[in-house]
Amino acid sequence: MEKNELESWRDSLEKITALTKQEELMALFQNPRLPFETKKSLLQEALGPIHPLAFNLALLLVSKGRLRQSGDILKQFNDLLDAHRGLVRARVTTALPLGDEEKITISRRLGTMIKHPVVTEDQVDPSIIGGFIARMGDQLIDGSIRQRLEALKKNLIEVRK
C-alpha cells in the first residue's frame, strides 16, 4: 500500500495462479530431480515481467512444492484488497443469466441494504426457478422462487395438522 503497488501485486498473483493450469509446467516444477536453478529459469520465462517480490513469492512456493496454493493466496489478497477499498463481493445466483441493467439494479439494492458498495459475481442455477440468491461472506439473502415454494409447502403441511 505504501508504494501504491496493489494493482501490480494483484496482476502478478493472477499470472502466478494462471501457471497452475498448465499441467506440463506444473509437472516440471514438482519434479524433485530438476535443479532449482532450472525451475527458476522456467518460472521467470513463464511469468514474464512481474513484480519482483511476487516473483520471490512464486520461487518460495515452487521450492516448497506449494505453487498450486497460489489461487488461495490470490483469493485472500483480493478479499483484503476489497476490504481496503470498502467493497463487498456478492455471489448472485439466478435461474437465467442477468442483463447489465439487472446486475446494476441488484448491486445497488444489495449495497443499500448493507451500506457498502457491492460488486456482484454472477452464476446461473436453473433449479432456483426464479428470483435470486445472494451470498456476501457469511450472509445469505434467498429471494428465490424455490425458497418461497418450500415455505408455502411447509405452511400448507402445518395447516393440515
Image: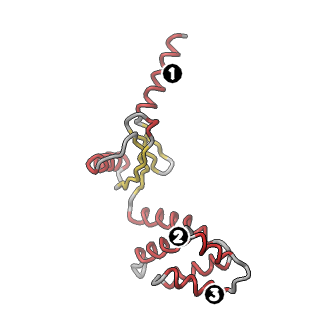
Mark 3 → mark 1, Cα distance in angstroms = 63 Å
Mark toward the viewer: 3 or 2: 3
> Tag 2 or tag 1, which sits nearer the N-term?
2
Q: Where does label 2 land, which residue?
A: 17
On the image, the x and y values in percent for residue 160 come to 52, 10
Q: Where does label 3 land, which residue?
A: 38
On the image, the x and y values in percent for residue 115 come to 35, 51
Mark 3 → mark 2, Cα distance in angstroms = 20 Å
Q: Secondary structure at mark 1?
A: helix
Q: Amino acid at mark 1?
A: Lys
Foreground residue among 159 and 12: 12
Q: Residue at x 47, y 43 (%)?
A: 140
Foreground residue among 87 and 123: 123
> Tag 2 or tag 3, which sits nearer the N-term?
2
* Quarter of the figure with residue 145: top left
The answer to whether marks 1 and 2 mark residues whose Cβ atoms lie closer than 8 Å is no
The answer to whether residue 31 is above or below residue 134 is below
Foreground residue among 160 and 44: 44
Image quadrant where one finds the C terminus: top right
Callout 3: 10 Å neighbours few (<14), some, many (20+)? Answer: few
The answer to whether residue 138 is above or below residue 131 is below
The answer to whether residue 150 is above or below residue 107 is above
Q: Residue at x 63, y 87 (%)?
A: 38
On the image, the x and y values in percent for residue 151 come to 47, 25
* Quarter of the figure with residue 20: bottom right
Query: Residue most toward the bottom?
Result: 37
Residue 154 is tagged as 1
Q: Amino acid at mark 3?
A: Thr
Q: Residue at x 53, y 85 (%)?
A: 44
Callout 2: 10 Å neighbours few (<14), some, many (20+)? Answer: many
